[in-house]
Each structure stands twice: as C-alpha cells, then as structure tokens.
Amino acid sequence: STFFNLRSFILVTYSFQFSLNVVYTCTEDIEENGKILAYKILSDGSLTEIGCVDAGGTSTCYLTIDRDQRHLIAVNYWDSSLVVIPLSKETGEFAGPIQNVYDPRHGQAMIAAAKKHGGVNHSQNDESTIAQRQVDPHSHALVLDPFEGCVAYVPDLGKDLIREFWYDKREGKIQFEINKLPSGLSTGKPDGPRYFEFHPKFNVAYVVNELSSTVAVFSIDRELLSDIAHAAKNNEPMEKFKSRSTLKLIQSIKTVPSAFPTQMNTCGRICVHQSGRFVIVSNRGHESITIFRVKQCNSQNSGKGMRGTLSQVGFFHTRGETPRHFQFDHSGQFLIVANQDSDTIAVFTFNLTSGELRFSGNEYRVPSPNFICSCPMVDRYSDEDDADAREKVGKTFLVSDNYHDHDVRSTIPSTVVVDPSKKDLVDELESAKKEIEKLKRQLSTLTVEKRA
C-alpha cells in the first residue's frame, strides 16, 4: 500500500470513481465555505488536480456520487445544507458549479455559535456540549439507496433524525423531504446519528449513533422504494409519499461494554465488511474497534433472530487514541486504523471467519490522521491489445495535515473475542457453498464465451 499527503489542508472525506481513476476530496472550515477538489490518480499512485469547486456551505464533511455518475452530492455539517454539483461522466471533472441546494433550516439563522465565537467543541459528549450541539440541525452524511438511486438518506446529528429525501436523478436535485424518523430507540437521551450504511446483500441498513454509542438496524421497504422510483419516472406528484418511511427500526445494540460510561465515548466510523458477514464500528474514548456478526438467515422468531441483525464478536484496542476513521484494504483482510489524537495509524489482520482482529506489527507515525481510503486502480491496456483488459491494483491514501517519514513501533494488542455459535457457522458455510457454486457457473459461462 502507498500512503500520500494529498494537500496541506484537512481532507475529511472522499468519493471514488473506479472506472476513471478519479478521487474527490473536500476541505473542512467552519468560517468559510468548503472546497471540493477532484484529482486524477496516475499509474504510479501520484495525484494531479483536475478541478475545484465551492461547496456552498461550511464544515463540508461528506461526498456522494449518484448512480449514473453524473452528479456529486456534498453535505455541509455546520449549516446542514445539501448541494448537488454536475460531473462529466467521460472524464470525472466538474461540469459546472453548484446546480441545486437544499437547506433543512429553510433560511433560518444558526442558533449556536462556533467554538471560535464562544461555542462548544463538537467532539465532546458532555451535557453542555450536547445542549448546544443539538439546538440546530447538522447533516453528517448522505447515502443514496442502492436499489433505485432515488431516495437519499441523511443522518441529522443535531436533531437525532434520519431524513429521507426524494432525489431527482434526472435533474440532479434534492427535491422533496419524504419523511423523517428517530435514529434510535427515542429514550430521551441524545443519539447523534453520524453515518448510514447499507448491507450489500440484505434489505437492511445500519446507522451509527455517535452520542449514544449504539448501532441502529433498519429494515428496508423495497416495495415502497420501487413505487417512489416508478412515480418519479412517470412524473407523478411525490407528495403522495409524504410521511411514508422506507425504514423500520428492528434492533439497537451498544458499541461499548455496558460498564463503560457512554458520556466518555463518541462513535467514529461504521462500515459493513464486503463479505456482508460483519459490521465494524470505531469508538473514540473507549479507543476500540467493535466487531459485530451479521445474522445470515431468518429465524422463526422476530427481533434479534432476523436476517441482518447483529451480535457482538468483541472489542479490539486500536493501539492509539481517538480512532476517527478506519478502512479495509481491497482484499478485506487488513484493517488500517487512523488514531487521530495519538498521531498513529495501526494495521490489523482481519479473520474472515471469526471476525477477530490481530495487530500485524505495523504501526506508523502520521500527524493527526483523520481519513483513510483504499482505491482499487484500473490499469487499461491499449486498444490494440485488449480494450477490456484491466488490472486492479490497490492504492491506499492516508489523509492528514502533514506527512512525515513513518516509524514502526510495537505495543501489545488487547482483544476480547466471543466465539460464534455452531449454528451460525453452519449457516455461513452453507451460504458460502452456494456463493462458490454461483461463481463457478459464472466462470464457466465466461470461459465458454471466450472460446467462442
């Protein structure tokens, strides 16, 4: 893997166009509008800037590319705005400035002050911080549904809500707020939804709640999504879907041990492993990675036995402080953790069967790492050789304020592992056998076509 310092400013997120070898990044500034930059990734992994546009808001924190790769959608945390920027499908460059803005505040001024002007540090989890942090809406991410690409899910960290928007993919516009629902159990205590992730195979989505240190599991109403997409295609009025949710809460589970004080922790990142068998969360305060096993088969009982629900595997120390971000390499067998406040990244091996993390012995000094991305590169041959031939090469980019030569240090890993049940392993084995047979059939078909 190759690590790069992309620019001197803080890069907080990225979106990657695989077929074009283009990566998008953004700056984070509470005083001035963020900037969104596009870089071409060259064959040696180096970057060259190909475009820069205004983000239309402050504290830009998340980027998404729509299904047709014609628009980039940016989320601005501080003022909660959502903006759409056109892209060239051929080159990945920006095709113009912002073409659509959605403001959940509907023009109202911010109530809370920024830290520089007497406000609070939004990284804390005490009562005074929460009181100010949740007085305003704060959009923290935007994820489009992977089935139709017409509903945008936005965790609102300030209001403890998941907002569901109709995204007009033809026009590239956030057009209409369909629904909003609580991001957790509504216990009266703050949740702080941070990120939203879909399961790659099941009709299930996961929300990590930063302030309550929980993962909320939602089932997806695919039929309603299909109805929304059909209505949009036929130019039908979307108001008929108002207050109808495509989400239903089916589980809430803690990310830290029950004895650990919730106010001493905030969650960082959540992701679903590419195998679909595990969900992973980082804990800032408990300084750990929590691994959850995903239930693969439905049981006759509802609740925890439903497909896609979670059971805890264990907690694994990150060998540093404040694991703001982590990323798997392209193989899914190595986990790279960014420990922001101890200026280190640590590399762990990931057991694809048990979900256990083990320290690899590799640890690097990097100032304030806050984001890591792994880009599967495309190396195209010339048209004379084979227009369709491509070679995938993993490139890992580390985002930090500055870059220094790394040093390697060794410390003792700390893990707690709970063995999965025998029935879960048997179910997963049967599922794996079916996947292997499916892949064999696909490979056989490809072989026959090539010979023909």
Image (cartoon, grey):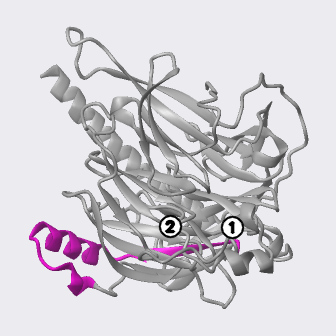
Disc 2 is placed on an element classified as loop
Residue 405 location in percent, x, y?
A: 77, 22
Residue 348 location in percent, x, y?
A: 72, 40
**Identity of the residue drawn at 44% across and 55% down:** 56
- Residue tagged 2: 80
**Identity of the residue drawn at 21% across and 79% down:** 238
**Identity of the residue drawn at 58% across and 56% down:** 59
Q: Residue furthest right?
A: 411
Per the rendering, the mark at residue 312 is: 1
Disc 1 is placed on an element classified as strand
Asked if 47 appears above or below 127 in the picture, the reply is: above
Residue 330 seen anywhere in this rendered image of the structure? no
* Closer to the camera in the image, 442 or 220: 220
Tell me the crowding category of disc 1: few under 14, some 14 to 19, or many 20 or more residues within 10 angstroms, Cα based: some
Q: Amino acid at mark 2?
A: Ser
* Chain part drawn in magenta: 212-241
Dividing the picture into quarters, in which one does residue 146 lie?
A: bottom left
* Closer to the camera in the image, 127 or 230: 127
Q: Amino acid at mark 1?
A: Gln
Q: How many marks?
A: 2
Per the rendering, the mark at residue 66 is: none
